Image (spheres, coloured by chain):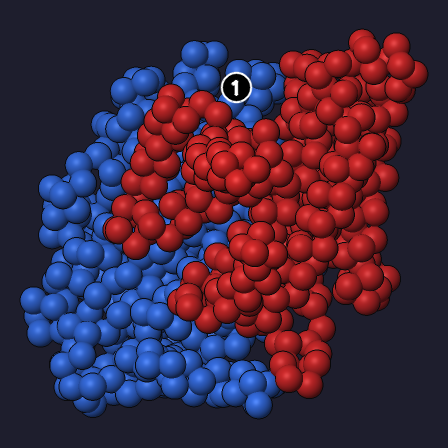
């Protein structure tokens, strides 16, 4: 019964959540929602065994593309967000040609270099990218009403609902992909690449597919951010932000779909709310780093392993009950 | 209906009213302060990360300022005397976090005024400023535009004051005829490059080559310095480099045997540079930010109260941390306090009206005027005299004060020309 109730309860909880938060926490919630999408797309990429250092830049590609589509061509913001995602995916396909000539550590470094090249292009070409100062005055999502609720996208609650719906849809698609034969092939490409290749699987094509899908959805995340904050610059997508994404994924664990999301939520709440509220404003990097080291030492399989430990005994008990009944 | 409650078409007034209705009315902009209530001032700047050197020392300076003001009876408004308290928010020089911080400071903490470093973070905050009408200050006037009616730049007109250093150099060392320049390719570096180019041109100093723009991620400055020195310049200009660049560049200049003139916007923690190079090497280094124990700051024209005492207290609490911004935010507070007391209110609209009344204001370095329409599209920058500082015998020494508007009246066309060439005029930015 609980299995069927959990999703509606979660949905109600997510709808009510912002109303229990302060204004600044609502703002953080918006960025958290977007980051949940970012880290989930990153996990999809890691399914094929490749870890990238350019994922945040790819998110930036979606942000820049969407901002420019609205500013230069007057494209309607929701459409430009989708186009931003498509642009990021197409660029990923283009990048896959040189990048997937590499594997493992070399791919990691190659992806970093590719990301830095893109960032340098944003800095170098003031027209249209705005140079180091980036693009500002990006069109916000246009306000609208659905009768019972007026969406005013300056307000974080409205944007949270909008971004939340987009992110939930994206996560559902990512989930379906992972559970589909394509997703299983991604796993095979990672864990049994020789066997998969012997079975006729085109490893490079599947790696490219994972890279493109992950990049496309990350691009949508970037577009969501750009149209909320109203400004983007190359520093918004630098390697420091990428380190945060890696940290979320590592602390949360990448074995399950929810692992990186757990990491993202836990660490964001810790860094942006708990430590600030406790008055450790200027000591946050130090404490954050210490917690990161401790979590890796004592939870090498990530936060998801804690959840699994909590769930497992109940499953075993249920099995035992079932056996007793039979 | 929920939609009615949430409200459509949020305006500044409805925003403030609705916010007040959420039991957070204390200290809201526009809301009258209760007698004896503490005035809260927001400090929204990078307190951690690579740009923290231009945020945290400012907050430290403000704490000293607050203690002095509170000890003297606080800020006197129509509602009585009010103590003052600073509430900091670390925006990590990130526009998204700056937006969150601005929201927190206004809607939760009820601040009456917010001071920022500005730069990359201002565009994230601007929508919040537009909606709320909150009065903000920036250290970077390049944030100003005709749309930023509640943003003021009352402490420093970066990078325009850099012309004073070049002007002094041309007057006092006329034998220096050629220069080279390097700068990080970012929002701070580029307008400063345009300004130095205009100042050198006005002073008859020739640039040996185009300014060398390096990526802000640069950590190895040996090739940068080698290239700078390849044309044997009389002057090496370090533009508005962050201290993380000024230090290694000076080290490289020292190691590569440079013995000529150096000019820079800042020389934060210059004692550390001297320790890494030598007192002789740093002798004659020209920059723009004085130590406040300088006797020249005791002259009658200076409006910053007890600069020597402030410097001594700052160094007692934060030894070795005095930098360009240590006094600047505090000097903005001097201006804000005077305006609030004149208006009798902490309401942002009343304060800015009182502040700009008559078109003049009391800048830390002397009386100044509200200025900037040509360069920034709005007269929200307070401009007057600025000191030229030279390192002599290992100590920063004010060599004189130069008037920025006077220079601009003579050479403004050059500045506009170079600003346009670097896309730094207000109508060219983003």
The colour with which the image depicts chain A is red
Q: Residue furthest right?
A: A200
Q: Residue furthest front?
A: A326
Q: Is residue A33 left or right of residue B387?
A: right
Question: Is residue B77 something that shows in the picture?
Answer: yes
Q: Chain of mark 1?
A: B
Against B204, residue B367 (above or below) is below
Quick one: which chain is blue?
B
Q: Is residue A37 left or right of residue B24?
A: right
For label 1, the residue is B220
Against B79, residue A15 (above or below) is above
Of A68 and B392, nearer the camera is A68
Quadrant in the picture for residue B102: bottom left
Of B105 and A199, nearer the camera is A199
Which residue is at 53% across, 46% downward?
B188
Q: Position of residue A155 (x, y in %)?
A: 55, 72
Which residue is at 50% across, 49% downward?
B94
What crowding class fits label 1: few (fewer than 14 Cα within 10 Å), some (14-19), or many (20 or more)?
few
């Amino acid at each position: 019964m609980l299995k069927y109730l959990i999703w509606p309860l979660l949905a109600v909880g997510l709808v009510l959540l912002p109303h229990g938060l302060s204004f600044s926490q609502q703002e953080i919630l918006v960025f958290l929602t977007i980051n949940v999408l970012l880290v989930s797309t990153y996990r999809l990429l890691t399914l094929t065994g490749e870890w990238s250092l350019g994922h945040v830049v790819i998110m930036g590609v979606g942000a820049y593309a969407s901002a420019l589509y609205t500013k230069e061509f007057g494209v309607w913001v929701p459409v430009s967000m989708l186009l931003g995602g498509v642009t990021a995916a197409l660029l990923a396909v283009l990048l896959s040609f040189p990048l997937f000539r590499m594997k493992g550590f070399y791919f990691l470094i190659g992806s970093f270099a590719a990301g830095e090249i893109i960032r340098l292009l944003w800095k170098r070409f003031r027209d249209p990218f705005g140079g180091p100062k980036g693009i500002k005055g990006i069109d916000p999502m246009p306000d609208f009403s659905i009768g019972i609720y007026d969406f005013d996208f300056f307000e974080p609650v409205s944007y949270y609902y909008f971004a939340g719906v987009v992110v939930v849809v994206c996560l559902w698609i990512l989930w379906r992909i992972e559970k589909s034969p394509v997703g299983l092939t991604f796993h095979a490409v990672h864990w049994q690449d020789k066997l998969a290749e012997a079975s006729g699987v085109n490893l490079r094509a599947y790696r490219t597919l994972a890279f493109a899908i992950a990049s496309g959805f990350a691009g949508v995340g970037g577009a969501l951010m750009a149209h909320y904050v109203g400004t983007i610059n190359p520093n918004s997508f630098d390697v420091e932000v990428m380190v945060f994404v890696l940290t979320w994924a590592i602390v949360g664990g990448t074995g399950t779909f929810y692992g990186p999301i757990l990491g993202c939520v836990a660490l964001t709440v810790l860094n942006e709310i708990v430590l600030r509220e406790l008055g450790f404003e200027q000591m946050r990097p130090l404490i954050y780093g210490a917690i990161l080291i401790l979590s890796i030492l004592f939870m090498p399989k990530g936060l998801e392993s804690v959840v699994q430990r909590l769930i497992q005994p109940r499953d075993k008990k249920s099995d035992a009950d079932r056996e007793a009944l039979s | 209906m929920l939609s009615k409650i949430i409200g459509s078409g949020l305006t500044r007034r409805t925003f403030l009213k609705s916010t007040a209705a959420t039991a957070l009315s204390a200290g809201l902009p526009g809301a009258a302060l209760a007698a004896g209530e503490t005035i809260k001032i927001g400090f929204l700047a990078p307190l951690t990360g690579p740009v923290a050197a231009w945020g945290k020392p400012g907050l430290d300076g403000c704490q000293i300022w607050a203690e002095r003001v509170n000890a003297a009876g606080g800020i006197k408004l129509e509602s009585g005397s009010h103590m003052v308290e600073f509430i900091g928010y670390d925006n990590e020089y990130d526009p998204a976090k700056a937006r969150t911080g601005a929201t927190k400071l206004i809607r939760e903490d009820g601040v009456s005024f917010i001071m920022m470093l500005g730069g990359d973070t201002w565009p994230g905050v601007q929508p919040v400023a537009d909606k709320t009408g909150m009065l903000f200050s920036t250290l970077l006037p390049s944030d100003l535009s005709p749309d930023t009616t509640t943003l003021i730049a009352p402490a420093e007109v970066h990078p325009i004051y850099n012309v004073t250093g070049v002007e002094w150099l041309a007057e006092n060392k006329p034998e220096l005829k050629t220069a080279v320049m390097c700068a990080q390719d970012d929002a701070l570096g580029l307008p400063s490059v345009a300004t130095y180019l205009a100042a050198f041109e006005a002073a008859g100093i020739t640039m040996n080559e185009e300014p060398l723009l390096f990526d802000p991620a640069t950590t190895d400055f040996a090739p940068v310095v080698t290239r700078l020195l390849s044309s044997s310049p009389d002057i090496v200009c370090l533009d508005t480099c962050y201290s993380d660049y000024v230090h290694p560049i000076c080290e490289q200049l020292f190691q590569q045997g440079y013995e000529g003139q150096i000019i820079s916007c800042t020389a934060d923690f210059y004692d550390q540079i001297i320790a890494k190079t030598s007192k002789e090497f740093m002798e004659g280094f020209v920059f723009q930010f004085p130590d406040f124990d300088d006797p020249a700051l005791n002259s009658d024209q200076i409006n910053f109260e007890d600069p020597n005492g402030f410097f001594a207290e700052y160094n007692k609490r934060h030894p070795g941390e005095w930098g360009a911004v240590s006094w600047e935010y505090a000097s903005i507070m001097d201006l804000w306090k005077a305006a609030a007391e004149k208006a009798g209110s902490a309401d942002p609209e009343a304060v800015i009206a009182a502040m700009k009344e008559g078109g003049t204001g009391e800048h830390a370095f002397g009386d100044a005027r509200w200025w900037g329409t040509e360069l920034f599209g709005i007269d929200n920058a307070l401009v007057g005299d600025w000191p030229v500082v030279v390192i002599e015998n290992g100590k920063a020494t004010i060599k004189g004060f130069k008037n920025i508007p006077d220079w601009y009246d003579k050479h403004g066309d050059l500045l506009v020309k170079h600003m346009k060439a670097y896309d730094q005029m207000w109508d060219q930015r983003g």
